[in-house]
Amino acid sequence: MSDTDTGGPFAVSVPARYRIGAWEVREPLAAGAFGSVYAARRVEDVPGLPAEAALKFLPTGTRTPRQLRHLQELTQRELEMHRKLSRPRLIRMYEALTVNDAEVPALDGATVLVLERAEGSLDALLSRTPKPPSGPTLLAQICEGLHQLHHAGWVHGDIKPGNVLLMADGTVRLGDFNLAAEMNGTHAYSPVFSTADYTPPELLWSEISERGRQTRPTTDIWAFGVLAHLVLTGTMPLPGGSNTARKEALLRYARGMDDLRLSPELSGPWLEIVTDCLARTHEERTAHTTESLLRRVEQAAGTTTPAPKLPRLRPRRPGRRRNIAAAGTIGAAVLAATGFLTLRDAPQGTIYGYERCPVGSVCFFSEPNGNGELCSWKDDDGNWLTGRETCAWTSDHPVKSVFNNDQESKERHDVVYYRGPDWTPTGVDLTRSLKRTGCTSVNTQGNLSGTYAPLSHRWVEHC
């Protein structure tokens, strides 16, 4: 596929009719700096999966070490957010897969998110209708999505028209969680990437630590104010015909040199809402949460049915088992539990056998979801067929699922596995940058997509 086929360069170029899991790739849908999205149809009968979906391909490990670190972190963020949250206004993830195709090096090892398919984006709608008549209703649903996200303890970090998805039934979903961050107290940490027109003033000169840049819910509130002004008036709230000019206007506003001059088309409650969202400082914006903002937006939009009150979420207990929705060989290949359907999306009646795995062990299973025959180890093993503990069924049957039931308090708690004895690569692993079959992080369980036939494993500090 050439760039002209997609309307622009794709981070990951995937040919039409390419197969991954139960899916066949169709036409390209969207391109971004950190991933490419393609339409797909299901070509295998798999309970719980829709007939059509959107496949988001995240790049492989064929990058520089610096790029790999960025891509690895962005991929993990999106997987973590999808894994933990399932809300009506957030785009749904059905499963996550890893491409296991040594014959196509550009794709081998790429992480693929299987997502709910949208009809288009708000960005596309605004390009056709700068001030859509449904704008107030769309804004109410966007604000509802932000409230659901903030209530669960997350910050989106990249609210903009391209990340607001329009569904076939006319409803709205928030998508693209590469920069999403989970709150830790009053703030979260996110990578130093953002869209300038939707970035609040305080982030222009914020300090950056090795964990990233501090971000808070007021970041999303500012971005919502920019988005609301654009949807309702067809213009950006800050003057300037280019990103550079608008950034200079933002700097003057942030320093108190200029006042905020909003479009005269805004009036009444919408003028008050946008003004509050675009308050000059983070401290001023903290007076407005997405919960209070949602009530005001719904009233201004004339929404007859208010958003339901969200249940109080219980905090996740330290050491709680996590159901990881993917694995990949991106850089360090932090996860290798691929093709896993999270419990919330699993078909009804699915039986899980992971509880058979002893605490402090890594377990490999002959069937998906922790079923079938089981082999478990607490220590390294250089040969599963002739070592201290044999796993005879793996000589003619691939591993279908894995559970790392070790403890994070241990120094070596992740497990890496190889196709050859004594931790050596053979066959297809020789073509991979890390020369191994996979690696599964502590407290991770899931299904492996493809033919995984490891013969040895050992414990490591980190994948």
Image: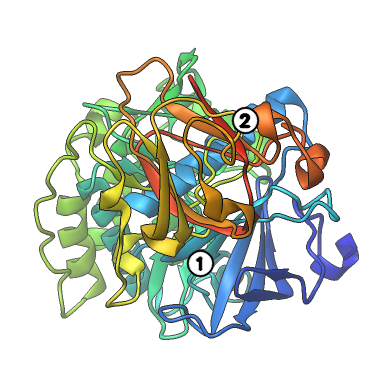
Quadrant including the C terminus: top right
Quadrant including the N terminus: bottom right
Q: Quadrant of residue 67?
A: top right
Name which residue type carries label 2. Answer: Ala
Mark 2: secondary structure: loop
Name the residue rendered at 48%, 19% in the picture: 461
Name the residue rendered at 50%, 25% in the picture: 380
* Residue on which disc 1 sits: 115
**Which of pointers 1 and 2 lies earlier in the amino acid sequence?**
1
**Color style of the picture:** rainbow
- Residue count near mark 2 (Cα–Cα under 10 Å), binned few <14, some 14–19, many ≥20: some
Above or below 418: residue 152: below
| Marks 1 & 2, CB-CB < 8 Å contact | no
Viewer-nearest residue: 164 or 415: 415
Above or below 329: residue 142: below
- Residue count near mark 1 (Cα–Cα under 10 Å), binned few <14, some 14–19, many ≥20: many
Q: Is residue 319 left or right of residue 311?
A: right
Q: In the rendering, at what x and y percent does residue 328 appear?
A: 60, 45
Above or below 230: residue 328: above
Of the two numbered discs 1 and 2 in the rendering, the one whose residue sits closer to the viewer: 2
Q: Quadrant of residue 146?
A: bottom left
Residue 341 seen by the camera: no
Q: Quadrant of residue 344?
A: bottom left
Name which residue type carries label 1. Answer: Leu
Viewer-nearest residue: 406 or 267: 406
Q: In the rendering, at what x and y percent does residue 120 appear?
A: 56, 74
